[in-house]
Image: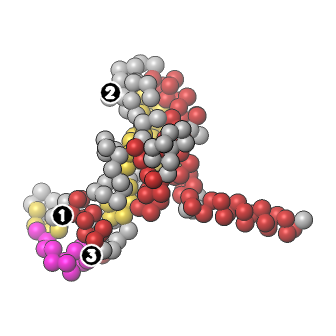
Amino acid sequence: MKNLAGEHTADKTILEELYLAGIPAVKVEQHKGEVPFSYVGKIGRWTFSRRWYYWSASVEDDQTGLPLDIALELHNKKHPTSKEILGLTVRAGGHGGGISPDDYVSDPVYNEELEQKLEALGYKKTYYEFLGKEVISISRGEMAELCKSGKLQVERYVNCYHIDDQIGLLEFAKAITTFEKGLRPYRIKEFFNFKKNNKNKKQ
């Protein structure tokens, strides 16, 4: 993707890239960071913001992104125009190496249920004055290892992506649009076959 750092006509490229990916553009207050833009993309709970040579897609802190099983399917999908997996250009967690979503780039929902499960594994709460409460201190990497080992069973989500090319932006937009509509990607074919069969029965 074109480097838009410091490009004062960035909106033109941004609108073109969003259009080609089928992502609705939303006018926002002028952003004065590395890329000066006044448009972002929006699909459901996801916001797309242009960075210097890639797109950043993320959900708000109080929302969940793609469930891990869907994130893994997207990650391992073959890139439409190369022999590589899509996860190398649609990078879970924004990780530069395109690591698996099953690693530390996916997060559980931090709530009372999670704390109870961690306490059952021997983790203790510590009081942090700047937070004004007791919390369990655990790294994202340690959390991921507990989940992969089966010791901790919780739903995990990928809440942020960095996307390096136009095809990746399109594929990601298709995946989250499908999810936001309540259909799992691996069920799309079956869904349309179901609709087709029902139509034929009516005829």
Q: Nearer the viewer, residue 120 or 115?
A: 120
The dot on residue 151 is: 3
Q: Looking at the image, which residue is at 36% across and 28% down? A: 52
Count of picture labels: 3
Labels 2 and 3: the sequence-earlier one:
2
Viewer-closest of 43 and 98: 98
Say what amino acid the circle numbered 2 marks. Glu
Which residue is at the far right? 203
Amino acid type shown at disc 1: Ile
| Disc number placed over residue 34 in the picture, else none | 2
Among numbered discs 3 and 1, the one appearing first in the sequence: 1
Left or right, 24 with reference to 106: right
The CA span between labels 3 and 1 is: 15 Å
**Secondary structure at numbered mark 2:** loop
Please name which of the two marks, 3 or 1, marks the residue nearer to the observer: 3
In 3D space, how far apart are the residues under numbered discs 2 and 3 (Cα atoms)?
A: 42 Å
2 or 3: mark nearer the eye: 3
Q: Are there few (<14), some (14-19), or many (20+) residues within 10 Å of tag 3?
A: few
Percent of width and height locating residue 171: 53, 45
Q: Is residue 74 above or below residue 109?
A: above
Secondary structure of residue under mark 3: loop
The question of residue 11 being in magenta is answered with no
The residue indicated by pointer 1 is: 138
Contact check, label 2 and label 3, Cβ < 8 Å: no
Query: Residue 150: x percent and y percent?
Result: 30, 74
Q: What's the magenta region? A: 114-126
Residue 154, image x and y in percent?
34, 71
